Amino acid sequence: MRTARLTLDGNDYELPVFEGSEGEVAIDISQLRAQSGAITYDPGYGNTGACKSDITFVDGEKGILRYRGYDIADLAAGCQFSAICYLLIWGHLPSAQELARFRDAMRAEALIHEDMKKFFEGYTTAAHPMAILSAMVGSLSAYYPDVVTDDDLDRNIIRLLAKSKTIAAFSYKKSIGQPFVYPRNDLGYASDFLHMMFATPMEPYAVPPAMAEALNMLLILHADHEQNCSTSTVRMVGSSGANLFASTSAGISALWGPLHGGANQKVIEMLQRIAEDGADYEKYLALAKDRDSGFRLMGFGHRVYKNFDPRARLLKSAADKVLEGLGVQDPLLDIARNLERVALEDAYFVERKLYPNVDFYSGIIYRAMGIPLKMFTVMFALGRLPGWIAQWKEMNDDPNNRINRPRQIYMGQTARSVTPMDRR
Ligand code: ACO
């Protein structure tokens, strides 16, 4: 067996080494504390493998992203998002019959319980749709609490996928004070979502095929990304035995942050600010390089990708196509392109290997589709749902799963006593 040797205070410890199917090397330190009393220290978990997984492979140096072995570019060219959900969650691309059954099951679950509509009444129209989504998804567990068999779980998985789409669209309708539009059984996932967003009780909405196609691709590109912040959150919460809805709700909250899925909203806010300030993108590049400015180039940089983000490449070319297909001209797209061009030539960004990430161009496409800014991170969440579900399920199916419980190195006060003076 291959091992690594660690020497600590003159003592040698042999640590098992294993390899993943793509040759990634891991040193198994799970027994290190029991053997030596020491733990490892890795803030931000940049070097910590928290699980073994069969779902998604990312090679950040080579810019590779694969779901269950399939390259993301292959999947994004022509697959339906529902087939990708199936692939991620159940491990293989569905046959025509499996896909038809899965779609029928999702359609049957697309409505939310009528009582849940009352929840929306409690929010102001200013409520951020991510706050609503996370609360509503957590609340689904109040309606579908019992999972005894694998079939129960499969039904809850389908409910989560189908009802989140309806909740997301309803949260938008709430924000603009319009009545909810119910799902339609004759539409695919992306088209149905757009119908619920843009139809009104007075007027149906004919979903432009270019828009449905673009949304389908965006959802696929966001569908999983191994152990990112929100997915690790879903696994962390789920490791305690928390149900699928509760764990996913936590993942939605983690995704909301501007350093993660919230970046897609922040990118557009940044581009708007630059546009209003005379499109002087060089000035903002300088600000991003100045640590004291507190300004970062949103949509740039990634913990794993150090060469390029394959999703950003696909989205950059899709942005041109979609805007043309929809007949939309957006000055923010030019600013984004210029910003990317100068950043990629700048020593600061080159040395730190900072490239556009998935959020850099996705917002431009959402804007062209008429999706409002506050909904951008919700769109990301809808796309990421199958990944969270697949990872939660994989963890629960693993007989070696233990509650996640990192350690710490305590750096605070050593033991001291409360004096009589302190007792007030
Ligand atoms: N603009 C300017 N400088 C940056 C940026 C940026 N967007 N990103 C990283 N840097 C700099 C840091 O200041 C740091 O510089 P230093 O070495 O001089 O201290 C160096 O690059 C490394 O950055 P870290 O923050 O240590 O990298 P980390 O891996 O922890 O963070 C992250 C990755 C959060 C994505 C970061 O690049 C960032 O904040 N980007 C902007 C927000 C964003 O787009 N997030 C979406 C990520 S994709 C996703 O979650 C879907």
Image (spheres, rainbow, N blue to C red):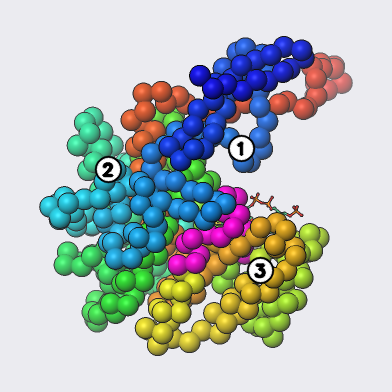
Q: Which mark is residue 297?
A: none
- Residue 142's place in the image compared with 124, above or below, is above
Of callouts 3 and 2, the N-terminal one = 2
C-alpha span from label 3 to label 1: 26 Å
Q: Which mark is residue 90?
A: 2
Q: Which residues are magenta?
A: 298-314
Q: Which mark is residue 344?
A: 3
In front: label 3 or label 2:
3
**In-image side of 192 versus 383 (left or right):** left
Q: Position of residue 67 (x, y in %)?
A: 38, 49
Q: Quadrant of residue 210?
A: bottom left
Observer-nearest residue: 417 or 129? Answer: 129
Q: Which mark is residue 47?
A: 1
- What residue is drawn where x is 66% and y is 58%? 353
Q: Is mark 1 within 8 Å of ligand 1?
A: no
* Amino acid type assigned to the residue bearing label 1 in the image: Asn
